[in-house]
Image (cartoon, grey):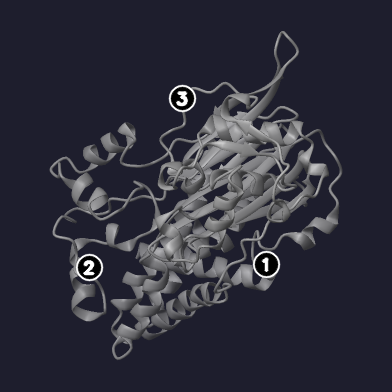
Amino acid sequence: MSRLVRSARDRWGRLSRTSRFLIGTSSIGYLFYLWNKRDKQPSTKPVSLRKPAKGIFRVDSVGLGASMPFEQASSVWIETGKHEWFLSGVYAGYWGEGSATILGSQLLKSLNASLITLYSRSKQPDNRRVYQSFITAFTGLDDTLIKPVKILLKDDSAEGMRKNLAAILFGISYPGSGALATFFDSAVQRFHVALVGDSRAVLGRRRKTDDGKIMYDVHVLSEDQTVNNPQEVARLLAAHPNEPELLDRLFRDCGRKITRAFGDGMMKWSRDFQIWLRQNTLSDEPSPFCLTPPYLSAEPEVTTTDIHPGDFVILASRGLWNSLTNEEVVGLVGLWLDGDRHNKNVDILDKTGGHRTFERDSLPVILTDNGSESHYRRWPAAKKVFVNMEENAAVHLVKNAIGGADLDLVKALMKTHVPRAAQFHDDIYVCLDAAYKYTPMNSEYWHNLWPFFSSTTGTELQLIRQAIISFQIAGSG
């Protein structure tokens, strides 16, 4: 333990219980303030950033909601100081938007701060230390969502306001969220991907065949962390060897799909504390099968890939992959690039005919299955036939994921209001990063980032860091 942390911990211990309670309350109150500032109906309109950072040609993003509140978010962070790198992320929440909203506002900032500290010690750190920076940022922010509940509510000074305070805290600690965060180091053309949950990162790489044809190879950069992943199942069962039914009772039966998550406190707090919450606040009854928590972790799996000029990476929530295969998504982006759609402006909602359609086997990619296991089965007489009509690559993907060439179906799905929309498709969030040879960054793109992230001032960022430190010190006592 460093001298600074020991000193801070000692000072914390010397404070009165009332002072510790007030400091903790003000810190979590600030987190809640950030969450409460969110747009009640988050913008899902398309965003395109052209040459936002060294080595990045463009970034396209869009979201299509099927739930209210919209439980997904996306963010970017462009570091323009001593280091020139680019961070992006997609966050897929469940059972509420609280955790995903905090992640969208804070995760990349925490990751960037962790990386700056790392790179101040080593000009080019090895991958192992980069991975540790991801782990530190992820688990530290998850602690900020989960630990304050126990620290604050168990304090005697909370008497008389415990139920009200708990209701506020549960808004960000009860919901869960996955996170897919990336870090592109332009100095070495290296792309790091960290995953918690079931969003997915897939890279497409252009190549020319012997006969001169342009094709795109598919490289999957993350592995879904779900109950269908044998490695995740083995990890959970090894950690809880006397609970053979936990996958059914705590995951499948209650609709919990992912095996790692931020938030979702009822899968992390001890059973005794959950019983205490039930007796003293408006908390849920602990599951009779929740015997030895924690069952969920926010520790990510991290991979690294060297980037070639012309590569592109699709970051998307489960909703996209439930409708399209990895190969279809890469092939559709390849189709979009080869069709030069990024230099055209065509609105699909104004087109009633005359557009060219594309069958699956005409995509510039090698298909490995028939693509029949998808949400296309939910829609009457829907066939996987695609179109290439959009200026924004993310919009191009989303619309082909909800009907493609069947423009009547696309319009119907886009106009179906929540929550009924959830019968026909999941929440979808897509962020597409396209790499290119170095082009100087144009500073105007700093001003065009919304809705990628809600900006906060330097003072606010300092406060949130102080809040995180306060909880880590309090939790270590």
Q: Secondary structure at mark 3?
A: loop
Which quarter of the image is occupied by the C terminus? bottom left
Location of residue 183 with respect to 43 vertically, above or below: above
- Amino acid beneath label 3: Asp
Q: Which comes sooner in the sequence, label 1 or label 3?
A: 3
Residue 289 place in picture, x, y as percent: 15, 55
Query: Nearer the observer, disc 1 or disc 2?
Result: 1
Residue projecting furthest to the top = 210
Label drawn at residue 455: 1
Q: Which residue is mark 3?
A: 369
Residue 77 place in picture, x, y as percent: 67, 54
**Do callouts 1 and 2 mark residues in contact (Cβ within 8 Å)?**
no
Classed neighbour count for the residue bearing mark 1: other residues with Cα under 10 Å, few (<14), some (14–19), many (≥20): few
Residue 314 place in picture, x, y as percent: 60, 40
- Amino acid beneath label 1: Ser
Q: Residue at x 39, y 41 (%)?
A: 225
Classed neighbour count for the residue bearing mark 2: other residues with Cα under 10 Å, few (<14), some (14–19), many (≥20): some
Q: Which comes sooner in the sequence, label 1 or label 2?
A: 2
**Do callouts 1 and 3 mark residues in contact (Cβ within 8 Å)?**
no
Label drawn at residue 273: 2
Q: Secondary structure at mark 2?
A: helix
Query: Nearer the observer, disc 2 or disc 3?
Result: 3
Query: Nearer the observer, disc 1 or disc 3?
Result: 3
- Amino acid beneath label 2: Phe
